[in-house]
C-alpha cells in the first residue's frame, strides 16, 4: 500500500471515530501517523526526484522574494509582466506557464524578486500538475501572493489554502509557542502558562509516543490543538505572510458578487487597475527597514541604505555584506532607535531597527 492510500485510510478512520475522552488517545495517534507520512511526501529528496525536468531551480536575488500562486488561467503571468520587467508567456488557455519565471519589482528603492509559478490544482500537494515542485518553491519565499479569479474567488482560495496546508505551509500565522524538550527519564512532564481547552495530556502522550518520545518536558504558552502540537513536533512547518489579490475585477462590474471571508486587493492585471496599491501592499507586508552603513572616520552613506527585513541582526547584515565578515567581526557600533547610547557597542546578535546607522569593527 502506497503512502497516499495509507493517508486516506487513516483519514477515513478519523472520520468514522466518534470524538470523546475514550478515543482522544487513538485520534492523536492517527493524526501523528498522517503527519509523518505527509512529511515523507514533502521531503526535499522526493521533490527533487520527481522533477522530471528543470525550470524550478531559481536563485534568490533582490531584497526579498515573492511567489505568485493561483489556479491556471487566473492572470499570474499577466500580473508579473505588469509589475516587473519580466516577459512571462501569456495566453487564453490553461497551463501556459510550465516553469518558474522570475522578475524584479523595483519599489521605494527595494528590489523585490517576484516569481510566477505554474498554476496549481487540487491534489498539488500530492504531486498532481508538478504540484510538489511548485509548492516547494513557495516554501522558500518571503511572501506569497495568492491571485484569485473574481468570478470564483472563494472556492479557489479554499483549494489553494488546503494545498498549502497539506504541504506544511501556514499562511498569515505564527508558530505555536510550545516547547518540547526531550529528557533521559521522568516520563512526560507537562506545564502551561495558559488554560488548555483544545488538547489533553493523553493526546500529547499519544502524539509524542508516535514519534518515539516517552520522556519530555512540554511547556504550552499557547492554547493549541492537536494539529498545532504536531506542527511543533514535526518542526518542518513554514509560516509565511500572504497577500490575496482578486483579479479580473473589470469583468464583474468592478466588484465581487458577494462579501469574501478574507481581506483582499481587487485588481485587473490586464487593464492595469489598482496595481499601485498592490505594489505598496507588497512593500508594506515585507516589513522592510533601512540600515545605513558607516566607515570609521566617515559619514554614514544615507544615499544607498541597505534594505532588509525587520528583525535583522548585526550578524545578518555581515552575511549580506561579505561571507567572511562574521569571521573577521570584533564588534559593531550602532546609532539609532535600537540602542540606548549613541553610539553603542553591540555584538552579532543585536537586532537592528529602521534607520539605524551601523559601523562594523573588524579584528
Image (cartoon, helix red, strand yellow):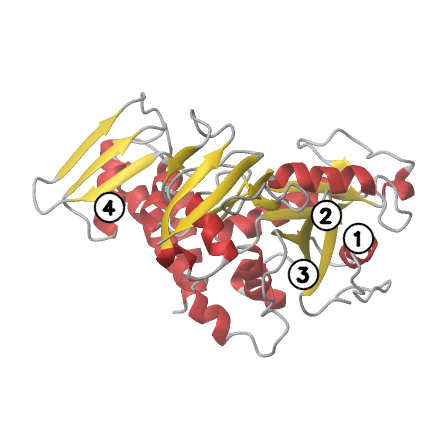
Cβ atoms at labels 4 and 3 below 8 Å apart: no
Cβ atoms at labels 4 and 1 below 8 Å apart: no
Q: Earlier in the sequence, mark 1 or mark 3?
A: 1
How many marks do you count on the picture? 4
Query: To which residue does mark 2 refer?
Result: 147
Taking depth in this image into account, of 14 and 313 the one nearest to the observer is 313
* Secondary element at tag 2: strand
Farthest residue to the top: give it. Answer: 195
Q: Earlier in the sequence, mark 2 or mark 4?
A: 2
Q: Quadrant of the N terminus?
A: bottom left
**Residue at the spot 21% in from the left edge and 42% down from the top edge:** 181
Res. 208 mark:
4
Q: Label 2 to label 3, Cα distance in Å?
A: 11 Å
The picture quadrant where one finds residue 204 is top left
Res. 79 mark:
1
* x and y, in percent, of residue 207 in the image: 27, 45
Q: Earlier in the sequence, mark 2 or mark 1?
A: 1
Amino acid at each position: 500500500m502506497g503512502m497516499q492510500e495509507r493517508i486516506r485510510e487513516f483519514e477515513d478512520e478519523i472520520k468514522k471515530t466518534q470524538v470523546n475522552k475514550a478515543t482522544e488517545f487513538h485520534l492523536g495517534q492517527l493524526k501523528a501517523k498522517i503527519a509523518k507520512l505527509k512529511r515523507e511526501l514533502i521531503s526535499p529528496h522526493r521533490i527533487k526526484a520527481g522533477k522530471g525536468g528543470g525550470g524550478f531551480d531559481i536563485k534568490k536575488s533582490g531584497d526579498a522574494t515573492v511567489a505568485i500562486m493561483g489556479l491556471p488561467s487566473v492572470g499570474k503571468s499577466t500580473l508579473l509582466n505588469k509589475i516587473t520587467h519580466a516577459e512571462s508567456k501569456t495566453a487564453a488557455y490553461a497551463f501556459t506557464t510550465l516553469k518558474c519565471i522570475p522578475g524584479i519589482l523595483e519599489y521605494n528603492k527595494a528590489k523585490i524578486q517576484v516569481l510566477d509559478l505554474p498554476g496549481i490544482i487540487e491534489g498539488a500537494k500530492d504531486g498532481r500538475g508538478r504540484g510538489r515542485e511548485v509548492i516547494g518553491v513557495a516554501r522558500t519565499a518571503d511572501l506569497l501572493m495568492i491571485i484569485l479569479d473574481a468570478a470564483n474567488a472563494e472556492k479557489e482560495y479554499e483549494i489553494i489554502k488546503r494545498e498549502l496546508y497539506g504541504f506544511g505551509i501556514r499562511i498569515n500565522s505564527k508558530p505555536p509557542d510550545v516547547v518540547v524538550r526531550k529528557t533521559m527519564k521522568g516520563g512526560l512532564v507537562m506545564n502551561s502558562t495558559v488554560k488548555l481547552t483544545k488538547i489533553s495530556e493523553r493526546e500529547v502522550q499519544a502524539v509524542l509516543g508516535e514519534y518515539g518520545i516517552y520522556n519530555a518536558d512540554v511547556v504550552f504558552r499557547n492554547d493549541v490543538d492537536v494539529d498545532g502540537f504536531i506542527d511543533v513536533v514535526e518542526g518542518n512547518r513554514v509560516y509565511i505572510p500572504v497577500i490575496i489579490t482578486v483579479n479580473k475585477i473589470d469583468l464583474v462590474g468592478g466588484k465581487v458578487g458577494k462579501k469574501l471571508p478574507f481581506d483582499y486587493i481587487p485588481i485587473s492585471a490586464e487593464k492595469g487597475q489598482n496595481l499601485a496599491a498592490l505594489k505598496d501592499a507588497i512593500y508594506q507586508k515585507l516589513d522592510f527597514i533601512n540600515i545605513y552603513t558607516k566607515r570609521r572616520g566617515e559619514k554614514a552613506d544615507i544615499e544607498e541604505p541597505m534594505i532588509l527585513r525587520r528583525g535583522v541582526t548585526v550578524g545578518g547584515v555581515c552575511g549580506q555584506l561579505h561571507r567572511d565578515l562574521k569571521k573577521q567581526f570584533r564588534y559593531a557600533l550602532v546609532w539609532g532607535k535600537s540602542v540606548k547610547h549613541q553610539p553603542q557597542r553591540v555584538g552579532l546578535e543585536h537586532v537592528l531597527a529602521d534607520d539605524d546607522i551601523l559601523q562594523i569593527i573588524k579584528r
